[in-house]
């Protein structure tokens, strides 16, 4: 029989969700940093094509910005706070 997981509070679930998003954002940033580093060894024409594609990919992945993720994150307490106070 499997052990039951402890039930997490809504605040803990919100925090876990946020940390997962931050981890995903970090992984995306590492991908772009690695790709940029690898471009240094590419042949000139190939490097130009790949730089253009990488710039387009970055534009699509704007949400990978960690600070933007932090700004847009809403804690559970903030969600339930009255906007009329």
Image (spheres, rainbow, N blue to C red):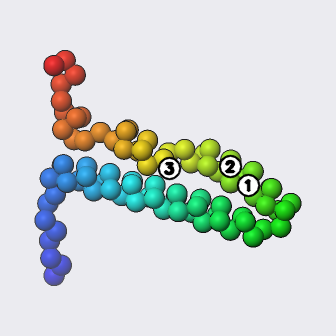
Q: Earlier in the sequence, mark 2 or mark 3?
A: 2
**Towards the viewer: 68 or 79:** 68
Q: Is residue 50 left or right of residue 15?
A: right
Disc 2 crowd, CA 10 A, few/some/many (<14, 14-19, 20+)? few
Query: Can you give x and y, in whole percent of width and height, for residue 11 in the image?
Result: 18, 49
In which quarter of the view is residue 37 placed?
bottom right
Numbered disc 3: secondary structure: helix
Q: Is 49 above or below relative to 59? A: below
Q: Are marks 1 and 2 in contact (CB under 8 Å)?
A: yes
For this orientation, the residue located farthest to the right is: 45
Query: Can you give x and y, in whole percent of width and height, for residue 12 in the image?
Result: 19, 54
Q: Which residue is mark 1?
A: 51
Q: Is residue 3 left or right of residue 38?
A: left
Q: Is 76 above or below relative to 48? A: above
Disc 1 crowd, CA 10 A, few/some/many (<14, 14-19, 20+)? some
Q: Is residue 83 left or right of residue 72?
A: left
Q: Is residue 76 left or right of residue 22?
A: left
Q: Which mark is residue 14?
A: none
Q: Which residue is mark 3?
A: 64
Q: Which residue is mark 2?
A: 55
Numbered disc 1: secondary structure: helix
Q: Quadrant of the C terminus?
A: top left
């Amino acid at each position: 029989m499997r052990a039951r997981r402890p039930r997490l509070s809504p605040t803990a679930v919100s925090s876990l969700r946020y940390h997962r998003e931050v981890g995903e954002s970090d992984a995306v940033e590492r991908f772009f940093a690695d790709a940029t580093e690898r471009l240094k060894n590419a042949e000139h024409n190939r490097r130009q094509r790949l730089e253009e594609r990488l710039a387009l990919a970055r534009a699509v992945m704007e949400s990978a910005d960690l600070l933007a993720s932090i700004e847009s994150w809403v804690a559970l307490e903030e969600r339930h706070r009255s906007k009329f106070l």
